[in-house]
Every structure is written in structure tokens, then in C-alpha cells.
Image (cartoon, helix red, strand yellow):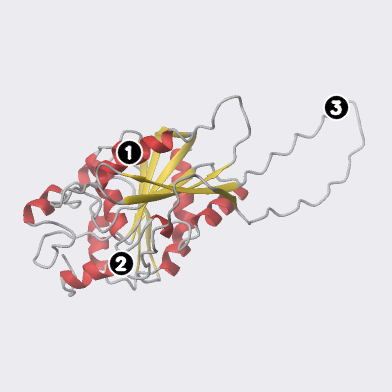
Amino acid sequence: MEDSVLGRRRLLELAGIGLGAPALAACTGGASTASTLSAPTPAPSRASPAGPAATAPPAPTARLTVRTSTGSFVSAFRPGTASHWSLAAPDMPPVGRPPNLPVAVFLHGLGGSHSVLLDDLAAHEALQRHLDAGGAPLAIAAVDGGDTWWHRRADGSDTQSMLVKEFVPFLGGRGCDLGRVGLFGLSMGGFGSLLLASQGRLPGVRAVAAMSPAVWASYEPGMEGAFDGPADFAAHDVFALRPSLAALPKRIDCGTGDDLFATVRNYRAELPGAVDGGFQPGGHDASYWRFILPEVLSFLGRNLG
């Protein structure tokens, strides 16, 4: 890793800082709850005198309300383990068919779970504010991935295939448009999002955003938790895969106080094409990720809408 004095083991530890892994719930259904945010009440307008050229004012646009749901399933790619998921999506006006919302899939960091999206980041509240400000409607979703680094591992788990073959198709059955898919994640999940977007295994991906991604330019001893050895690293080397992101809208952010700053800067510097985001004051923690999340949702909304 260029420009870094930190050991690889320390950087691996950083991938999980700030977000713990909650206990799995026994939820298998799709219980929904409405967001508690409320829209500002518009000021009453003064009626104008009628005249020959007067026209009726446009009907007010119905406010979209974000609702959340959770559930679980047993994946063929994580046998014997319940994989829990979360989904936040706006209620869409009835149009005679299910809503066809774009969806952004969130990948959590080391030690995290699906609940990071709604519990730690409060992303459903950020999504509600995004919609209230006139942002393009979209759904956001997350699923448990364990500490697998979002790719096939020697133990037989393959959470990337779980995303591609099970979870994303499941979201399609809940009204999401699988031709308009975004990927975003933090730390380990930032790496996983960049990897999946770079490898092109998921049709319909239109944008990727990585928050403080845990990325490295080379393999060294001590990285066994993330990769099964040098060959596994080479097969999933996001630095080498950068050219494949040339045409894809992408956003990379990292805090200047993050110990991953140097390697993220090196990764970002040679990405082909335009790159949104940048470096802001902050560390490798939930407060920084909450700070940049509104801009990340805006980026995803623009590119998926």
C-alpha cells in the first residue's frame, strides 16, 4: 500500500471500527413501519382574482413516505446461516401496477450486518429528507454478509453470488427495477461494492459509491482475514480492475483523519473517468458516514432515476 506506515493487520481492524454486529432477530416476514419524519406544512397561498387568462393551479404533489421492512432467508451460498435483510422504500402512488423503483444495495463493513443501514446510519431518515427535497425516488436495501469480504472464500461461502443470484432478484419481486441498480457500502462493504461493480457480474448496475473503502494495492501477510492468500487477492484486486469502471458513474469518499486515507487516495487517483465525492474532515466511524450519506443518496438518485 502506497504512502502508508500502517501494518496490514491494523488496516483490517479498521474495516470494522464504529459499527458492531447486532444479534440476529427471528424475523422471517416483512413487517413494515412508517418513517417518523414529517414534511413541513406549506404556508397558505392568497387566492388570485379570476380573469380570462386565469388557469387552475396545479394539483399538489403527494408526499412520498418512506416505509421500512425486514426479513430473513437461508442462502444457498451461506448454508446453515440465517441471512437477514432490511429494505426502505417510498410508498408510490397507485398506477395500476407495482412501482418500478430503482434500488441501491448497501454492503456493510466488518463486524456489521444488514441493520447498519437503518440502525447505525439511519438511512431511511436520510432517504425521507432526500425525497422531501425533491430527490429522485429510489429504494435502499441491505443483507447480512458476515465477515466474508463480499467474495467467494475457501470455506465455501460466496456472499457476492448471494447478492447476484438471490438477494437482488428477491428485490425485483418487491417492485424494484433490476435494470436500475446501484451499489454502495462502507469499509469492507465499500471494497465489496467496488469489486462487484468492477467485475460486472450484476446486470443493471448504473452507479457505485464507496465510503471509506478498505482497499489495498498489494497482498502482504496479515491479510488472511480478507483474502485466502495471494492468488485470492489477485483474483479480487480492485486496483487492477479500475479500468472496468471507466464508463460507470462512481463516487469515492474518505475522511482525512481515517487511517485508510492514503490507500483510498491512491486508488481514487487513477480511476478512469469522472469521480464524484472526495476527502472531508472525519474518521473511520458512523458520524462521518452519516455526514456524507445525504450526498451519497443524491448521487445514487441522480444516476438511477
Looking at the rendered image, the disc whose residue lies closer to the viewer, 3 or 1, is 1
Residue sitting nearer the eye, 80 or 146: 80
Q: Residue 246, relative to residue 290: is it above or below?
A: above
180 horizontally vs 265: left or right: right
Name which of mark 1 and mark 2 comes first in the sequence. Answer: 2
> Who's the residue at 46% across and 38% down the image?
102
> Who's the residue at 34% across and 53% down the image?
144
Structural crowding at the residue carrying mark 2, measured as other residues with C-alpha within 10 Å and reported as few (<14), some (14–19) or many (≥20): many
153 horizontally vs 211: left or right: left
Looking at the rendered image, the disc whose residue lies closer to the viewer, 2 or 3, is 2
The x and y percentages for residue 62 are: 68, 40
The x and y percentages for residue 181 are: 39, 39
The x and y percentages for residue 75 are: 30, 44
Mark 3: which secondary structure? loop
223 horizontally vs 32: left or right: left
> Alpha carbon of mark 1 to alpha carbon of mark 2: how far?
25 Å
Q: Name the residue tied to disc 3.
A: 53
Q: Name the residue tied to disc 2.
A: 16
Mark 2: which secondary structure? loop
Structural crowding at the residue carrying mark 3, measured as other residues with C-alpha within 10 Å and reported as few (<14), some (14–19) or many (≥20): few
Mark 1: which secondary structure? helix
247 horizontally vs 62: left or right: left
Q: Which amino acid does the dot numbered 3 rest on?
A: Ala
Q: Name the residue tied to disc 1.
A: 166
Q: Which amino acid does the dot numbered 2 rest on?
A: Gly
Q: Which amino acid does the dot numbered 1 rest on?
A: Glu
> Alpha carbon of mark 3 to alpha carbon of mark 1: how far?
57 Å
Residue sitting nearer the eye, 95 or 302: 95
Quadrant into which the N terminus falls: bottom left
Looking at the rendered image, the disc whose residue lies closer to the viewer, 1 or 2, is 1
Q: Which mark is residue 213?
A: none
